[in-house]
Image (cartoon, rainbow, N blue to C red):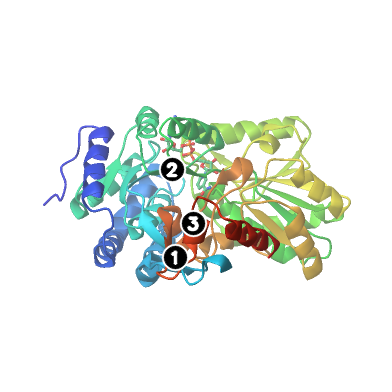
Amino acid sequence: MNAQDLPSSPLLAFERQRAAASKEPGPPWAVRAERLRRLQRLLVDNEASIARAIDADFGGRPAIETELAEVWPSLEEIKGALRHGRGWMKARRAGVGKWFIPARAQVLPQPLGVVGIIVPWNYPLYLAIGPMAAALAAGNRVMVKMSELTPAFSALLQQLCTQAFPLEEVCIVTGGAEVAAEFSTLPFDHLLFTGSTAVGRKVMAAAAANLTPVTLELGGKSPAVITPGYPLAHAVQRILAGKLLNAGQTCIAPDYVLLPRDQLAAFVEAARQEARRGYPAGLADANFCSVVNDRHYRRLVRELDEAASRGARTECLFEGASRDDERHRLAPTLLIDPPADCGAMRDEIFGPLLPLVPYDRLEDAISFVNARPHPLALYWFDQDTGRVDEALHRLPAGGVTVNDTLLHITQESLPFGGVGASGMGHYHGQWGFDTFSKLKPVFRQSRLNGMALFLPPYRPLMRRLLALMKRY
Ligand code: NAD
C-alpha cells in the first residue's frame, strides 16, 4: 500500500510539508529515529534493485562500486545519525559573560522546517540519502529533486519513498532541468544543492528571492601533488584508485597531477601497470564504469583530442581498445604536459582522463594550484610532516587527504564541503545536523541580577560601573 499520494506539483507538496512542519515544529527523537530507520530499511531491503537501476542509468556501473561508494556511505550516515542524533538534539551549554553571572546560556538546536535537496547524477543514491539523513535527524521535512540523467534510479527511489513515507515527511521529485529550476524557487527553509558551479549560481540566485539559505556542494579541479622523494608506486596506486572509481565521475576525484619533472616517465610506466593490474580486461572489464551518457562521452573525447592536437602526449592505460562509442566507455588516458589553456586543464574533467603537469620546483606547484579557483579537494603526497603542515596552511581547499585520495569524505567527524568556487557550507555527521538546524541561542536570566542598575534614568553609579566594565 502506498503511504503517500503523489502531488501534482512540487509546490503542492511543499505546501503540505510546510503545514505539517507548522503543526509539529519540534518532533521528538523517537519520531526522528523512526524516520531514519525507515530510510535504513528502504536501503537494506532494496540494495540489489538500486544497483540494477543505477547500472541501467549509466549503461554499465559495477554493482560493487554502487555498494562501496553509495550504499555503504549512505548507511554510515544513517547509522551515525541514529547513534548520536539524540545527543545532537540536546541543548548545548554555553558560558555567559562575567558581568551576567549567575545567569545561564545555552544553544538549542531547532528544526528549520522544510529542506530542499537537489541531487546530481554521479552518485544519485548517496547524494540524496546523505543530506536526507541529516535533515531528518534534525527534525525537518524533506523534498528531493533527482537528476534527469538517472531516470531509472530516480523513479525507483520515488517509488520506494512513496511506499515508506507520507508525503508530509519525504517527497521525491523527478523531471527535467525545468522542474529543477522551478523546484529551486520554492521558499524552502534550507536548500542543499549538489552539482556544477554553473548551475549552483542559478540555484543561489533563485534561493535569494526567498532568502532561503543555501549549502552549495559544487565541483572543480582537485589537484594531486606528489612531492619530491615520495614513493611513486604508492602515489600512483592511490591516485588511480581515486580517479578510476566511477570512471572519474566523482566530484572529489583527483582531476590532475602535479609531479616532479624527472618522475614523469616513471609515473607513466607505474600507471600503465596499475591500470592493467586493476582492470585486466581493459574496456570490457566488469569492474570499469561507463561514462554516463553520450553527451559526456563526446565531451571527454573532444578534450582528449584537443589536448593531443595541441601537443600533449597521450598514453592510454588499458591494453586493447581505448574507446567504445556504442557503450560510451573510455579507457583511462594520461595527458602528459598539456597546454594550460586547453579544455582538460580549464574545466573539471569528470571522467577517466588524467593530465600530468610536471614542475621543476615544489614552489611552482603551489603557485599553480593557488593561481586557480579553490579546489573541492586537495591530495598531497609527502613524507615530510613539516612540509605537509606548511602546504595545509598555504593551500585553500574544501578538504584534504594526505598520502591517499577520497578518504576525507568518508569521515563522519569531518565537515564535507567546498570553499570559494567549489561550494559553501558543509554537512556529514553532526555538521549536517547543524546545517539543517537553527542553533537557537537562549539566555536565561537569574533572579539575582544587576540589570536594574542599568535602566534609565542613568545614574552616576551606572556610569562608574560602565567605566569599570570597559576596563576589565
Ligand atoms: P548539474 O549542475 O548539471 O545538475 C545538478 C542538478 O541540478 C540536477 O539534478 C539538475 O536537474 C539540476 N538543475 C539543472 N538546472 C537547474 C536549474 N536551473 N536550477 C536548479 N537545478 C537545476 O550537475 P551534474 O552534471 O548532475 O553533476 C556534476 C557536477 O556536480 C560536477 O561539477 C561535480 O563536481 C558536482 N558534484 C559535486 C559534489 C559535491 O559533493 N561537492 C558531488 C557530486 C557532484
Report the residue at 69% width, 30% height from top: 306
Is the residue 297 above or below the residue 67 in the image? above
Report the residue at 43% width, 30% height from top: 209
Report the residue at 26% width, 64% height from top: 28
**Residue at mark 3:** 287
What type is the residue that disc 3 sits on? Asn
* Between 33 and 59, the one nearer to me in the picture: 33
**Residue at mark 1:** 106
Q: Mark 3 vs ligand 1: CB under 8 Å? A: no
Can the viewer see residue 1? yes
* Between 287 and 141, the one nearer to me in the picture: 141
The answer to the question of whether label 1 and label 2 lie on touching residues, with beta carbons closer than 8 A, is: no
| Quarter of the image with the C terminus in it | bottom right
Is the residue 411 above or below the residue 180 in the image? below
Distance (Cα) linking label 3 and label 1:
51 Å
* Mark drawn on residue 121: 2
Q: Mark 1 vs ligand 1: CB under 8 Å? A: no
What type is the residue that disc 1 sits on? Gln
Residue 98 rendering spot, x and y as whole percentages: 57, 68
Mark 1 / mark 2, whichever is N-terminal:
1
Residue 159 rendering spot, x and y as whole percentages: 23, 47
Report the residue at 47% width, 60% height from top: 452
Q: Residue furthest left?
A: 1
Left or right relative to 426: residue 376: right
* Between 472 and 294, the one nearer to me in the picture: 472
Left or right relative to 148: residue 221: right
Residue 331 rendering spot, x and y as whole percentages: 59, 46
Secondary element under disc 2, as helix, strand or loop, is loop
Q: Mark 2 vs ligand 1: CB under 8 Å? A: yes
Mark 3 / mark 1, whichever is N-terminal:
1
